[in-house]
Amino acid sequence: MNPKLVLGLGILALIMLTLALMIGRELAGPEDQRDEPLVPELREQVNDIKAIDIVGPDGETVATLRRERERWRVQEKSGFEANFRLIHDLLRDLAEARRRDERTSNPEWYARLGVADPGVEGSEGMLVRFPDTDLPEVIIGVADQAGIGRFARLRGEERSWLIDRAPDVADSTLGWLESAIMDIPPGDLAEVTIRHPDGDLVRLRPADEDGDQWVLLGVPEGREAVTSWEIRPVASALAALSMRDVRPNDEMPDDAVRALFQTRDGLIFLATLFEDDEGRWVNFSVSADAGAVAEDESDDEAMELEIDAAAVDARLSPWQFALPDYRFDEMTSRLEDLLVEVEVEDG
């Protein structure tokens, strides 16, 4: 065989082998990343994260989350406490998320998966940013129909992925707030008093130790109270109490309603309630009832009660909370709301 031909075939074979290896690497690239962490560096840094920005599909910042003194806070709401569980779960899911399947690298198809950059027409995804770190920004897209997880893409990378987690990323500022205010069941209360600026007065006391039965005091002659189960919602107003919005406490109108809830262990919650163009609001101030400590109890127990009251007051009193309508109505009940006419039997 012609030596030149042999040499030419050898060179051609070498070229073909080289091309095959290059193509193989390109094809194997995505395969190599399957089952790899979505954000490899996050797992080691997760406990040191102190700042998270959440950006919506329109490119506007939804929530600026900052960790201060071991508590996460929402800067858009004057530093009110954030929902720790939501942030914890988001960081856990992103730190543990793995790339299950590669999806499109074509920017024209990103919007269908919700992984287009914020501000791009048709974008649906939420962007998670970690300021002051070298971590990449993560775009969390829509959930896949098979229920495996959600689509995601690291901003700046072409490849998008189906990940094996479905991180929950609230798309509103309010969604990042700790919405629970308090949870005091009626069985923990010793008395409820609601005083309106016109002098209307509602006073309730429990008729049993469990707080299941409540009685209305000061029933006018010729009238009678509604049934106990109709009174109980008023006494349950502080149970699983949550808010719709929050703002720093400021001046409150003189015609506000005052509702006082006294617990059996001596805490007094004074609720000041009023309405304005932005909602139906309540502010709480908390104090200790010195008379609630029995004479045979120690000074230490009285001091502990004072400390508890001060701690709860420090958390609640700086804020005004927007309440759901039904809770506001319960906490501003009037005497007439809890009365019925006495039925007179014929004959």
Image: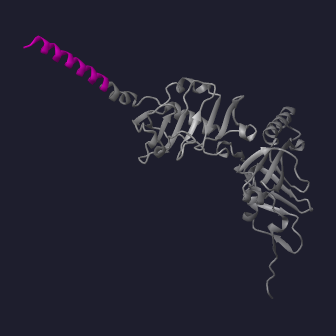
Percent from the top left, x then y, of residue 9?
Answer: 16, 17
Front-most of residues 180 and 291: 180
Q: Is residue 149 visible?
A: no
Residue at horizontal 72%, vertical 28%? Answer: 69
Q: Is residue 184 left or right of residue 141?
A: right
Note whether 283 is above or below 61 in the view shown: below
Q: Total marks drawn?
A: 0
Residue at horizontal 73%, vertical 41%? Answer: 77
Q: Quadrant of the C terminus?
A: bottom right
What colour-coding does the image apply? one colour
Front-most of residues 85 and 212: 85
Magenta segment main secondary structure: helix
Q: Which residues are magenta?
A: 1-23
Percent from the top left, x then y, of residue 274?
Answer: 83, 55
Residue at horizontal 89%, vertical 63%? Answer: 200
Outermost residue toward the top?
3
